[in-house]
Image: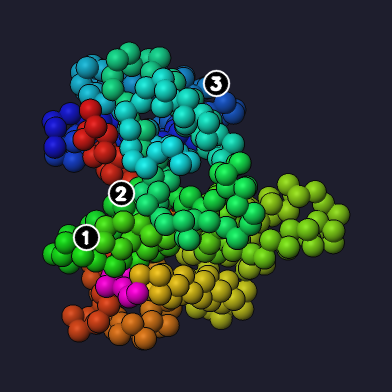
Amino acid sequence: MKDINVLVINCGSSSLKFQLINASSEEVIAKGLCERIGIEGSQMTWTPAGGEKYEVKMPMEDHRTAVRLVLDTLTDPERGVVKSLDQIGAVGHRIVHGGENFASSTLITDEVLRAIEACNDLAPLHNPANLIGINACRELMGDTPMAAVFDTAFHQTMPAEAYLYGIPYHYYEDYKVRRYGFHGTSHSYVSRRAAQMLGRAYEDLKIIVCHLGNGASVSAVKNGKCVDTSMGLTPLEGLIMGTRSGDVDPAIIEFLCNKEEKPVQDILNVLNKESGVLGLSGGFSSDFRDLEKAYRAGDEAAIRAMETFAYRVVKYIGAYTAAMNGVDVICFTAGIGENNPFIRSMIASYLGYLGIAIDEAANEKRGEEIAISTPESKTKVLVVPTNEELAIARETAALV
Ligand code: ADP
């Protein structure tokens, strides 16, 4: 890979995460986070490679100010990690929704910006913030090449029977209402890495990736192509998540509107922010560390939340095994998938029909790349820590 430094930018509505990665050594040179942009109390935390984390508290009225602070810090004569902006060869931007316009990452041009903007109504909370980040970087970094890496792109290979909803077809034609899927950078990275770990050709494998974090999704990757994934038009569909409901009967919405005398937006807010394991545990917690502790202490609400969460994952694994006519390897990734042996074994306990046998000692490991199935296990089970920033840096370096 080219010997350039790639600045990876992930802009949220009031935050900006960044990493500077050398594309050749894949070393993280520095990383950080600007929070509360446009809100009182904004701050940046920043960690140079091998150095200590420190905080800069200063007002950041907009994303442009945040990008300026990031660039000034990276090039600071005392605390910085590069001499000048010339040593940043490219910028990779994480973009949430590329609609049907983007099946792969792309270099950013004015035309690409317009196409991303056209997807704004599909992701009204995310895409506008992503665009603000791009514009701020373009303003401050002159001709530095920039790439857009989409959360949806990896899933564009899904066949129509997987992406269509059973609603009048003209809604797809008129408004592009269909399933898109998200976390694509992670599903792509993890599935490829799984093939490498097994020493097998990516194109020969049937892989199920369980990305289990606050946001959670499952994907089916057959012969190197995504054929199905659990998130839909928006990231609300599919698995039960930290605070999101995942799949529900759509009639629930009207039913609750009537019962609670609330508008649709309020109920959607409940489905996005007050549901999932948080809602199932009666508001106790969306964090699996809290839930596991309470589960072990016999707390009924935590038991209910974790078992319902695990069961939904198990149902998707079954569905995707059917969709691919088999499965060679199941991967766990993201905060819960990488760090929670308890939930992994709860899920695996349903999978005897796939000939899965778990190595309990290996399963106790956290946050490392490891096979947690026994050598005899018919279907392999791997933990593969995801690395979306590295994947974005690789895509960007390959494009420039
Ligand atoms: P997000 O979707 O916000 O990126 P994460 O992937 O960080 O979410 O996942 C958050 C979840 O992962 C939490 O429920 C948390 O309990 C779990 N988690 C993250 N890190 C650890 C850890 N080191 N040990 C145990 N659980 C963890």
Question: Compared with residue 389, is residue 146 higher up or lower down, i.e. above or below?
Answer: above
Where in the figure is residue 164, as x and y percent of width and height? 53, 56
The crowd level at tag 1 (other Cα within 10 Å; few <14, some 14-19, many 20+) is few
Task: Using a 10 Å C-alpha cutoff, classify the residue at mark 2 as few (fewer than 14 neighbours), some (14 to 19) or many (20 or more).
Answer: some
Regarding residue 32, the answer to whether it shows in the image is no
| Quarter of the image that includes the C terminus | top left
**Does 100 appear above or below 259?**
above
Task: Identify the residue position indicated by label 1 in the image.
Answer: 203
Badge 3 marks a residue whose secondary structure is: loop
What type is the residue that disc 3 sits on?
A: Glu
Residue where numbered disc 2 is placed: 387
286 within the magenta span: no
- Cα–Cα span, label 2 and label 3: 30 Å
Counting residues from the N terminus, which is met first, the one under dot 3 or under dot 1? 3
Q: Nearer the viewer, mark 2 or mark 1?
A: 1
Kind of residue sitting beneath label 2: Asn
Q: Is residue 201 above or below residue 57?
A: below
Which residue: 26% across, 38% down?
395
Of 254 and 87, nearer the camera is 254
2 or 1: tag closer to the N-terminus: 1
Give the SS element for disc 1.
Answer: helix
Magenta-tinted stretch: 325-331
Residues under numbered marks 2 and 3 in contact, where contact means CB atoms less than 8 Å apart: no
